[in-house]
Amino acid sequence: EDGTILATADGAGEVLLWNTKAGGLIKRIKPHREPIFDVSLSRDGKSVATTSWDATIEVYDVETGLSNSSMNLGNNSCYSISFTPNGLYLLCGRLDKSFELREPDSKKVVLTFIGHTDVVSSITFGVNPNNALTASWDGTARIWDVTTGMMIQKFKGARGMLHAAIYNADGKKVITGGDDRVIRVWDALTGQVLKTLIGHQAEITSLSLSKDGKMLVSYSTDGVVKCWNLE
């Protein structure tokens, strides 16, 4: 919650937990034998969830490094994962293009979200803890009410897959990036494009905001990182 813990994952199935203030490694956890697709740290910093090519979801206790929950998904891996802000549920975007809300203790699916027609590539939350923002390989981003499973808004207009979608600092705008190499800034309420940022020469796979919300950092598959002034 205070941003002092960073979780990273790798192709060897290992999670590394870092202290962002001291810059040191806190703990290594080995939840998978196959490459990890995604990792999510709960907002209170107490739990870390991972999903992997091995078609399992693993939830570990950050302090002890011990498993809290293990979910076998059969032959259908989960590609993207995120804790809900209260840390009680997991949102999962699976390779069969389904998008669901899971409860880790019971390992049950609580809600299924209908709308995306391809794999959900990223999941995030903004200032409203009930509204999840997703990006998908179907070229759209969407806002969902996680208490009902209903779609609130759809952002359509990108050419090709989307790999990243985030809220701006106050949650009134949505920022997306993907295969067409264009960053779009959208009005979260109307779904209309407000601004485009052009400069990347390869697919955009990651977006992040500075703490004050004034600077956007983007990454593309050619290894280029760009910083954009949003003011």
Image: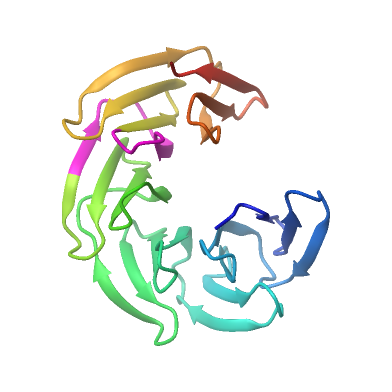
Q: Name the residue nearer the viewer: 203 or 131.
A: 131
Q: Residue at x 56, y 74 (%)?
A: 58
* Colour approach in the figure: rainbow
Residue 29, compared with residue 137, is above or below; it is: below
Q: Where does residue 158 sit, x and y in percent of width and height?
A: 32, 26
In the image, the segment drawn in magenta is: 153-172
Q: Residue at x 66, y 65 (%)?
A: 34
Q: Is residue 125 visible?
A: yes
Q: Where does residue 49 sit, x and y in percent of width and height?
A: 55, 68
Quarter in which the C terminus is drawn: top left
Residue 156's image quarter? top left
Q: Name the residue nearer the viewer: 143 or 182.
A: 143
Q: Is residue 38 left or right of residue 140?
A: right
Q: Name, please, the residue furthest toward the bottom.
A: 106
Quarter in which the N terminus is drawn: bottom right
Q: Is residue 158 visible?
A: no
Q: Does the magenta segment cover residue 88?
A: no
Residue 109's image quarter? bottom left
Residue 220, compared with residue 88, is above or below; it is: above
Q: Name, please, the residue furthest toward the top.
A: 199
Q: Is residue 193 left or right of residue 137?
A: left
Q: Residue at x 26, y 43 (%)?
A: 142
Q: Name the residue nearer the viewer: 168 or 177.
A: 168
Q: Where does residue 7 sit, x and y in percent of width and height?
A: 66, 57
Q: Where does residue 214 sit, x and y in percent of width and height?
A: 49, 24
Q: Residue at x 44, y 79 (%)?
A: 104
How many discs appear? 0
